[in-house]
């Protein structure tokens, strides 16, 4: 049988003329299930169009057994939030010796924990808003902590970027905000509020993509603004000076490397009225929906959606040779 090969940064991987089988893992029970399904369907359709043998796999109690039965050549993780991003699924796939795109266990776990990510930012000289951490299971303060003051931002420490996030503009907003964040359990981040413009910097295989500015059509880049058509406007490349854009890209690449992230990531920023940059968090499984920021940044450099998906799949397939 004639083999067709391709080269990657990791190692050459050869596969038969019939392309590999890819399982697209999607769904689950996290607060971002619907977005996961959108990403998964988009990726599945794209891979099918590229000639890959593709099947969708619901992330439920039986997914491990189905993977063991069918043994795909690679898994495309299309999950968002919860165990899809905190390293749990990555650990299972490592145990099954099935390659996947994106970051491994450690980088995924650290990036999903906003408290740990903030500590890593500070250790690497990346500016980030001041914050304190509360235990959702302990008695919670009845007003914003004096160290942070009001206004402030309240968010669960280990959820997606817009899930359970509230801006406390005045003290009367505090009880509802802290109650919403506490629903997710674990730890709660109370962060300094930074008034300014919102941006994101994407990294694709060590390449910094153009900065995207996010202009929400509500008071903040809420879950609805992020995933509802018309909920926000994206400008790419962002209309900011070259040095500011370069600083955001440098910070994003530094954080990507510090986390030990691989293949791709996306770091969110705020730019205040004085031109100061503040990093918020890093997403190691950026969304790939029709409204997602990462594909827009890639498109600005001439990388189409289908080319982006195939690059990520090839990165996963290249690890087969290394593992085997």
Image (cartoon, rainbow, N blue to C red):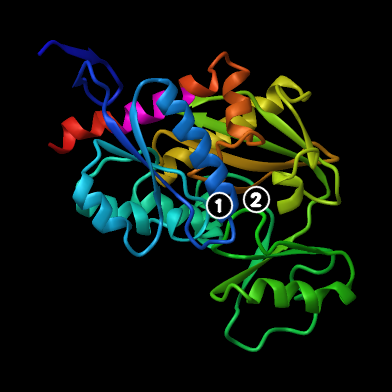
Kindly indicate whether the residue at mark 2 contacts the one at mark 1 (C-beta within 8 angstroms): yes
Res 206 seen here: no
Residue stretch rendered in magenta on the structure: 308-316
Q: Quadrant of the N terminus?
A: top left
Percent coordinates x, y for residue 182 in the rendering: 64, 76
Instruction: Describe residue 273's horizontal placement relative to residue 48 as left or right.
Output: right
Instruction: Describe residue 199's horizontal placement relative to residue 123 as left or right.
Output: right
Instruction: Describe residue 110's horizontal placement relative to residue 20 as left or right.
Output: right
Mark 1 element type: helix
Q: Residue at x 52, y 54 (%)?
A: 117
- What secondary structure prevails in the magenta region? helix
Residue located beneath label 1 in the image: 122
Mark 2 element type: loop
- 274 vs 49: above or below: below
Q: Residue at x 49, y 22 (%)?
A: 306
From the viewer's side, name the closer residue of 144 and 225. 225
The crowding category of the residue bearing disc 1, from other C-alpha atoms within 10 Å (few below 14, some 14 to 19, many at least 20), is few
Q: Residue at x 74, y 44 (%)?
A: 228
Outermost residue toward the left?
Answer: 1
Percent coordinates x, y for residue 127 in the rendering: 64, 46
């Amino acid at each position: 049988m004639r083999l067709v090969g391709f080269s990657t940064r990791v190692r050459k991987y050869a596969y038969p003329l019939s392309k590999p089988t890819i399982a697209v893992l999607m769904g689950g029970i996290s607060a971002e299930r619907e977005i996961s399904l959108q990403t998964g369907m988009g990726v599945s359709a794209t891979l099918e169009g590229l000639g890959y043998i593709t099947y969708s796999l619901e992330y439920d109690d039986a997914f491990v057994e189905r993977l063991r039965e069918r043994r795909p050549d690679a898994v495309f993780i299309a999950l968002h939030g919860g165990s899809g991003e905190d390293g749990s699924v990555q650990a299972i796939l490592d145990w099954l010796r099935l390659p996947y795109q994106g970051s491994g266990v450690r980088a995924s776990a650290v990036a999903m924990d906003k408290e740990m990510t903030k500590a890593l930012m500070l250790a690497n000289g990346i500016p980030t808003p001041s914050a304190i951490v509360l235990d959702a299971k302990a008695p919670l303060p009845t007003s914003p902590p004096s160290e942070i003051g009001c206004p402030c931002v309240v968010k669960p420490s280990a959820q997606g970027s817009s899930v359970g996030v509230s801006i406390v503009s005045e003290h009367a907003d505090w009880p509802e905000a802290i109650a919403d964040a506490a629903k997710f359990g674990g730890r709660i981040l109370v962060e300094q509020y930074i008034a300014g413009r919102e941006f994101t910097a994407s990294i694709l295989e060590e390449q910094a993509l153009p900065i995207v500015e996010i202009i929400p059509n509500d008071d903040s880049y809420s879950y609805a603004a992020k995933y509802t058509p018309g909920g926000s406007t994206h400008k790419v490349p962002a209309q900011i000076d070259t040095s500011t854009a370069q600083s955001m890209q440098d910070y994003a690449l530094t954080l990507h490397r510090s986390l030990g992230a691989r293949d791709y990531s996306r770091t969110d920023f705020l730019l205040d009225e004085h031109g100061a940059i503040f990093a918020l968090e890093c997403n190691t499984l950026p969304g790939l929906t029709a409204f997602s920021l990462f594909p827009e940044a890639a498109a600005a450099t001439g990388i189409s959606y289908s080319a982006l998906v195939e690059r990520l799949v090839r990165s996963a397939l290249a690890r087969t040779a290394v593992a085997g």
